Structure formats: structure tokens, C-alpha cells
Image (cartoon, coloured by chain):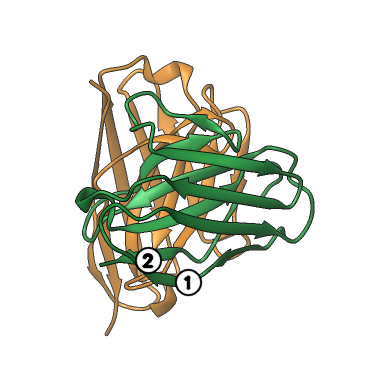
Amino acid sequence: DIQMTQSPSSLSASVGDRVTITCRASQSVSNYLNWYQQKPGKAPKFLIYAASSLVSGVPSRFSGSGSGTDFTLTISSLQPEDFATYYCQQSYRTPPTFGQGTKVEI
Amino acid sequence: EVQLVESGGGLVQPGGSLRLSCEASGFTFSRYNMNWVRQAPGKGLEWISYIESDGSTIYYADSVKGRFTISRDNAKNSLTLQMKSLRADDTAVYYCARDRSVFCYESWGQGTLVTVSS
């Protein structure tokens, strides 16, 4: 199975900060990398697919980059509604696997 | 509007069985691949099963293979997960999720909690 490792596991930030989350795959996943946001008690929300394509309706302050094994999710200016846990996930090979999550806290 | 509504969760004893359902609306269900993804309390996300739009291809995670069965009824816009030989580590919120492309989950239900405990 392809292992996905996110860093950091948690971070503290303030409104307006630029935040970067890293996701590393144990082998190349090309650009088959997706990002999700999850708030407590809620289902995950689809943010980015194919490493850098923003889902319709997601604010443009979110962006993704990378290919192969190293990927990043960037929030250019953190807003109050962005405090949540973020997961990367590879869809390159079965079984699809998720990172352990990065919790973004105030 | 795409809606996915899971049901069937609850408390079950170890070794028991449970059947989860996911009712879909707001889209042409028969055109989409579907998945079950679970999340143990306080833990991350784990994919557990996939079924292709016409039911022709099915995959399972090793953790549930031989114990869980995914199926769908395109006429009823319904996805099912039959679970047997349940263990304590199957305790989780179970989500159904619609694919945008294979294993890329663009829509999620609200989840249903399964608790395996004596």
C-alpha cells in the first residue's frame, strides 16, 4: 500500500496567516492527489483534485501543488471558517490511502 | 443538489452483523462509482470498499475483505454495505461517497455511526 504522510500533524495559526501543509507519498502517485477539509462532527469536504485543481465553489485562497511524491496545500490568508482538519489522499493505486490529517487550530 | 443519506448504524455485539444503506438523490446514481469510507472515533479516514457504476467491479480494503459486502441497486438509487463478523475495531462513522473519478470523493453523506461493543 502507498503510505501518505502529512506534516505537521497540527499547527496553530492566526486569521490572515499563510498556511502550508505538506503531504508525502511513499512512492510516486503522479498527480493523483486530492485534498479534503473536515470540521468536527461533519463529513469531509472535497477541496482539490489532481494535485492542483480547485473544486468549484472552493475559495481561491486554497491552492495545491506538487507531483510524484511531494505535495502541498496552501491557504494564502487563513479565515475563521478554515480552522479544520485537512487530509491528503492518493487515488493512483488501490487501495486509496489518506494521510493522517493536519489539524489547523487558532 | 446531490444528497447521500446513510442509515442502519447502531450498537452491535462483537461477532454480529449490520446492514448499512445509502440513499442517493439529486443525480443519476447509475452513472457514478460509489465508495464506503469510515472514520474511527478521533482517528483519520479509511477507505473500505468501492463499487463501479454498473456493479461490475468491486474492491475491498484488506481490513474488511471476506466480512463486508458492498452492493447497489441502481433502480432504487441505493448503495448497501453488509457487515458481518464485526469486531471492536470496526467501530466508526461510516460514510458513503460518490466518485468524481476513481477514488476521488466529490460528495459525501453525513455518516452513520457503528459501535461494536458487548
As displayed, is residue B100 above or below residue B94? Answer: above
Q: Which chain is green?
A: A
Instruction: Name the residue that disc number 1 marks.
Output: A9
Q: Chain of mark 2?
A: A
The image quarter containing residue B57 is: top right
Instruction: Name the residue that disc number 2 marks.
Output: A103
Q: Is residue B33 left or right of residue B74?
A: right
Q: Chain of mark 1?
A: A
As displayed, is residue B117 above or below residue A58? Answer: below
In this view of the protein, which residue sits in the foreground, B109 or A67? A67
In this view of the protein, which residue sits in the foreground, B55 or B48? B48
Crowding around mark 2 (Cα neighbors within 10 Å: few <14, some 14 to 19, many 20+) is: many
Q: Position of residue A75 (x, y in %)?
A: 41, 47
Whether discs 2 and 1 lie on one chain: the answer is yes
Q: Position of residue A8 (x, y in %)?
A: 51, 70
Q: Secondary structure at mark 1?
A: loop
Name the N-terminal-most of marks 2 and 1: 1
